[in-house]
Amino acid sequence: MSNWKKICLVTDIPVLGSRCIQRPQGMDVAVFRNDQDGVFALLDRCPHKGGPLSQGIVFGSSVGCPLHNWTIGLCTGQAAAPDEGCTPKFSVKVESGVVHLDGDELATHALDLVAPVAGPGCKETVALDKA
Ligand code: FES
């Protein structure tokens, strides 16, 4: 059973951009919006060298990493071939224009992955309890 938490309105997320959600533990989650108002959530960490996917450009159902331009699928977190790797994805529910993430996943998923020591940070982060 899911423990859905209200995060924001779809319209709070820039089209072809993202909004970062800060978790009590673990790295931020980037919530993306494409040009069809599709909403996707991935750990804000590229599977290549940990780049901030939240600062990438969304196209179709993918995001281009801002560091070395890998293409990451927003539905799966999988890097497009020939690159290899996967970033953890998070469940999303959109209801009446409101974006929800699973609170249990936010509390437990991918806590072992850490941010790179150097590099650009998240462009905009909203604490989970302030979302
Ligand atoms: S860190 Fe994302 S492509 Fe290198």
Image: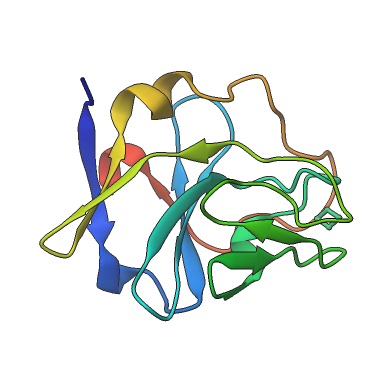
Side of 59 where 19 appears, left or right: left
Image location of residue 117, percent across then percent down: 83, 39
Image location of residue 62, percent across then percent down: 60, 65
Is residue 5 positioned above or below 44 on the image? Answer: above
Is residue 4 positioned above or below 33 on the image? Answer: above
**Quadrant observed for ligand 1 in the rendered image:** bottom right
**Which residue appears at 66% of the width and 40% of the height?**
87
Side of 80 where 104 appears, left or right: left
Image location of residue 107, percent across then percent down: 41, 22
Based on the displayed image, in which of its 4 quarters is residue 26 positioned? top right
- Quadrant of the image containing the N terminus: top left
Q: Nearer the viewer, residue 128 or 49?
A: 49
Side of 31 where 92 appears, left or right: left
**Which residue appears at 27% of the width and 73% of the height?**
11
Side of 82 where 100 appears, left or right: left
Is residue 117 positioned above or below 40 on the image? Answer: above
**Which residue appears at 79% of the width and 41% of the height?**
85
**Which residue appears at 45% of the width and 33% of the height?**
23
What coloring was used for the rendering?
Answer: rainbow
Residue found at the far left of this picture: 96
Image location of residue 119, percent across then percent down: 82, 53
Is residue 110 positioned above or below 130 on the image? Answer: above
Residue found at the far front of this picture: 81
Q: Nearer the viewer, residue 96 or 13?
A: 96
